[in-house]
């Protein structure tokens, strides 16, 4: 019979200590885990990758830290919720959640995080190695493979923000070791390095910095910056604006096919950015520069 284990940390910060859980037992396969209204950090017993949990719930009222300078908590969970507000509060969140979801975990939902101080890393740092997993960040600051140079992560989809979300509600940083099939920006900000097959932008601010071999980029709104080197097979713009001029013109950037539809407000580019520029309909643009 599956159990729900709530972290107390009554003895220590060791996940593998039975007396640190409310029912006096360490979580086992098919169990669920809850961290709520608690401030005891988890710093030992971090390799739980062999335990297939049903779900993990890290409430916004949990203010302890997870992981150490050199180690993540390794999890295998069908569903993980971070930052829901189901506890008593206050809902300030944890300053450090370092979570490695390995090759088998499923969906990861982030509803909020602690506030990221200027110059500090994101309070939630995630790794995974599952090209079928989805990360959805509705609000808060999340780094993917941002802990150490050489960290790698594979995800199927990364969703950032939500329709109508505040401009600063969600922030996702995808480091150079990140590989995804799809990144979708609904609102907030996304900074992307790594390898991504397709990116769709509905609103917000997107920065692409040295992204390799993008097949498609579709922009419906917001502002996109193409910094660093990158190659894009097809860029389609239905709205919003794009700026490729923030880096030195010698930086290698290539867009093979560019389609611009009515509704785009600005396209600022260095010369030779597009081999095939196809402008759709009669455009009314407020500021267009093809430098």
Image (cartoon, helix red, strand yellow):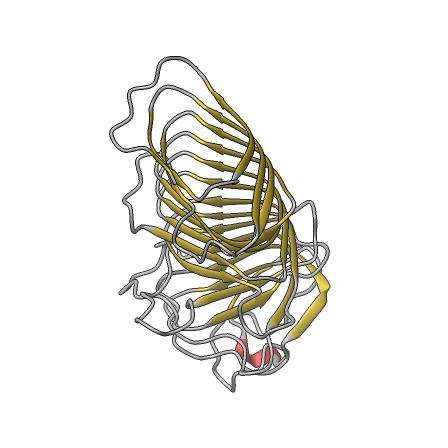
Quarter of the figure that contains the C terminus: top left
| Image position, residue 151 (x, y; %) | 63, 69
Name the image quarter holding residue 50: bottom right
Q: Residue at x 35, y 42 (%)?
A: 204
Residue 9 lies left or right of residue 234; in this view the side is left
Q: Nearer the viewer, residue 255 or 15?
A: 255
Q: Do we see residue 161 in this rendering?
A: no
Residue at the limit of the structure toward the bottom, as seen here = 11
Q: Nearer the viewer, residue 276 or 222?
A: 276
Q: Nearer the viewer, residue 234 or 168?
A: 234
Position above or below: 277 against 15 = above
Residue 278 lies left or right of residue 197; in this view the side is left
| Image position, residue 228 (x, y; %) | 51, 56
Position above or below: 205 against 98 = above
Q: Nearer the viewer, residue 150 or 261?
A: 261
Q: Do we see residue 117 in this rendering?
A: yes
| Image position, residue 35 (x, y; %) | 46, 66
Quarter of the figure that contains the N terminus: bottom right
How many numbered discs?
Answer: 0
Residue at the limit of the structure toward the top, as seen here = 281
Residue 142 lies left or right of residue 28; in this view the side is left
Name the image quarter holding residue 38: bottom left
Position above or below: 266 against 261 = below
Residue at the limit of the structure toward the right, as seen here = 50
Q: Residue at x 58, y 65 (%)?
A: 145
């Amino acid at each position: 019979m599956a159990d729900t284990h709530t972290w107390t940390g009554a003895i220590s910060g060791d996940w593998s200590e039975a007396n640190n859980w409310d029912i006096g037992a360490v979580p086992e396969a098919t169990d669920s885990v809850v961290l709520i209204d608690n401030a005891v950090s988890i710093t030992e017993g971090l390799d739980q990758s062999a335990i297939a949990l049903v779900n993990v719930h890290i409430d916004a009222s949990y203010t302890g830290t997870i992981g150490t300078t050199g180690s993540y908590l390794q999890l295998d969970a069908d569903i993980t919720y971070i930052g829901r507000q189901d506890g008593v509060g206050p809902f300030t969140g944890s300053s450090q959640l370092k979570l490695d979801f390995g090759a088998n975990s499923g969906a990861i939902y982030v509803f909020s995080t602690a506030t990221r101080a200027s110059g500090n890393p994101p309070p939630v740092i995630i790794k995974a190695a599952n090209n079928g997993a989805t990360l959805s960040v509705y609000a808060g600051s999340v780094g993917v493979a941002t802990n150490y140079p050489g960290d790698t992560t594979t995800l199927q989809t990364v969703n950032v923000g939500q329709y109508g979300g505040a401009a600063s509600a969600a922030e996702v940083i995808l480091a150079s070791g990140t590989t995804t099939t799809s990144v979708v920006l609904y609102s907030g900000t996304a900074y992307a390095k790594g390898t991504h097959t397709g990116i769709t932008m509905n609103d917000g601010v997107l920065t692409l910095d040295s992204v390799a071999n993008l097949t498609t980029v579709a922009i419906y709104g917001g502002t996109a910056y193409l910094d660093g080197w990158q190659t894009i097979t097809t860029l389609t713009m239905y709205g919003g604006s794009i700026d490729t001029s923030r880096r030195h013109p010698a930086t290698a950037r290539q867009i093979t096919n560019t389609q611009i539809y009515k509704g785009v407000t600005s396209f600022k580019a260095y010369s030779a950015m597009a081999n095939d520029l196809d402008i759709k309909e009669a455009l009314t643009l407020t500021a267009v520069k093809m430098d």
